[in-house]
Amino acid sequence: MNQRIESLRTVALNRSLCQDEFYYRFYRRFSGNTGDYAAYGEAFRAALAGLTPEITPGELIVGEFGCHLTESEAAEWESTYKSIADKTSRFAGLGQDSHMAIDYELLLREGVEGILRKIDGYMAACSEERRAFYACCRECLLGVVEHARAYSRHARNLAAQEADPQRRSELERIAEICEKVPAQPAASFYEAVQSVHFVTYCLSMNPLRFFSWQQFQLGHPDRYLEPFYRRDLESGKITREFAQLLLDLLGIQINMRVCSGLSSGYMVGGRDAQGRVVAGELTEMCMQVIDDIRLVYPAVGLCYTPEMPDSILEKACNILLHGRSHPAIFNDDVIAAGLASYGVENPHDYIHSTCVEITPVGTSNVWVASPYTNMAQVLLDCLERPCASFREFMDALFVEIDDKIRIHFEEENAYRRHRAAHSMNPLLSCFVHDCLETGVDIEKGGAKYNWIMPSFVGMANLVDSVYAVNEMVFRQKKLTLPKLKQALDANFEGYEPLRLELLNALPKYGNDNDDIDQYFGLFTEHIIAECKKYTPVLPNAKLIPSVFCWIMHERFGVETGATPDGRKAGFPLGDGSGPCQGREKSGPTASILSSTKWQHQQLIGGVAVNMKFSRSSLGPDSASVLMALAKTYLARGGFEFQINVVDQETLQKARKNPEAYGDLVVRIGGYSDYFVRLTPEMQEEILLRTAHGL
């Protein structure tokens, strides 16, 4: 089994993803009329049914992209259809997608054929417009079934040619399972895992989002797979070891369908719809996948609740201490309370939709991080205004923030309106409530929750800078705003003593100093209240803020001038909602205290607190110390806690010899990536983060 995992993880690590065959086969038939459901359904079904199956040696869970165009087809794709795909997709609209998990319980309980029967019932009495939508949904679902059965035939053909008896038996079993699922309800753990992966893989082929890789999440597998696992285990149909292997292979398949630099995975733990704590064997096994395959995905989130056995949190901490960048630890009580405050019916059924953004499972079409707002630049813009007092300065700053929220909302809302008019996603609509129930495509508002979640990046820079302005300009009167702006415009050239004073002599957010920490809550409370004033265009839509960054702290940093916190132009902004790189000087506990002095509950768009610990400091009690830190953060109302345990020496070696460290994974700003694939600037930013001892 280890040899199988090692072989397949190597394939995943070095794989270049290619969906050209699907898009070629789709756009050969689709005219580009994004309002034509009949043409879309026919083209989608034909493209999936004609897609070449690919099974990598050793796989037990199948369904992956391959480059199977003939030379003439590839030439035709490049010369004719690729530009059509790009033009059609861009006309269909900008904006977010795939930051969600579908209703996997529905899939496993009903199978595609059960969903088809539901659609037939809806079609019996509906308007002509809805009939066209339902008919398209049927075609897309039938394409999924036909593609799965093509895999079944391919596996049988491979089995007939296979000399090794064990592999021949495995291929025959794959053929049997793909003949059955996802068409029919899953009846075993193996069938359930295959069905979940196959439908997710098919959803990743979205022809009207040609320019955007899809990164669907897998929901809570320790919940929906539990009945299959327990039944098969008790009947002797499966062993724990084989179930773990299937979960590991499912994890590898995520890496086969999602390119690095994004984020895709699942959540475990938390509470179910009845309020019962989920903390069983499968919870630990789903986390064990991280250690077993050692790849950038799955991005696993542990939903922690105080009633959970300590063994679950201890398992998570031990995996982190092995140098893995997952699992991230989420506060189930805080998140559920936040979701309930926004009107979610089942607030415990959520997913970290890529990094830390929270979206309801199986019911949402949420645009996360839409858009990112550069808070350091907002501050710099405010310095253009003359202000006679700190109160005037803060009033001007809030006006700048409000203007950015309004402008960005209007842009995103316009994108939403355009997508609703010119796009469709019938296959996804089959697995998201209430699209089928109402006969409304997910792109047109069929989901229960249609939020937009802007994210505010560089909050720690904003806090440190505001404190510096108040202290240096208005309290101590060491310089004027114009003089400060002059120094910033010069990137501190000729003002190095001032820069060092700003950077080192003034307190910084992250050191348990109430005087400066208070500003973080002041800004987040204002942002939350301001966002509540806006209602996006689709039904049950809200504007819900977040304070995390993905990679935008590096991108914004490159284009942002020097800031009053002593940061030079071009340097990355703070990497989440914790302190800026290297500024927490008082240890991890003080950093945690600062990061939890403000309310996280309504920032459902995501709160990311990154902490780095030195591998060289690890000892026999490190797991218990890390658990205590995590519990402190969560008990104080912290939203999410993510850990990097890596030594500077390894990172420096990886910079000098990237070929030898191709699988070194680090946590960035809510997501993880391979260290050697980061930009040199991002690598430097990781190195400069404070490494605490344990």
Image (cartoon, rainbow, N blue to C red):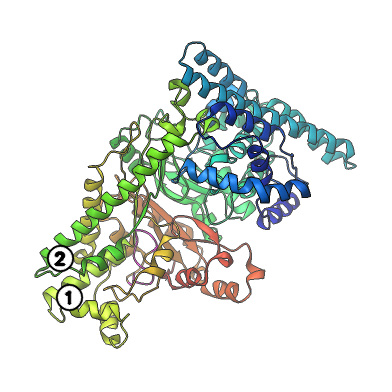
What distance separates the C-alpha of mark 1 from that of mark 2?
10 Å
Q: Earlier in the sequence, mark 1 or mark 2?
A: 2
> What secondary structure prevails in the magenta region?
loop
> Residue 393: which disc?
2
The residue shown at (22%, 73%) is 468
Is-magenta flag for residue 317?
no
Q: Is residue 8 above or below residue 441?
A: below
Say if residue 311 shows up in the picture: no
Say if residue 332 shows up in the picture: yes
Q: Is residue 322 above or below residue 302?
A: below
* Residue 598 relative to residue 60: left or right: left
Magenta range is 575-585
* Residue 158 relative to residue 4: left or right: right
Residue closest to the eye, 322 or 440: 440
Name the spot of residue 448 as percent of width and height, x first: 39, 30
Residue at the spot of label 1: 481
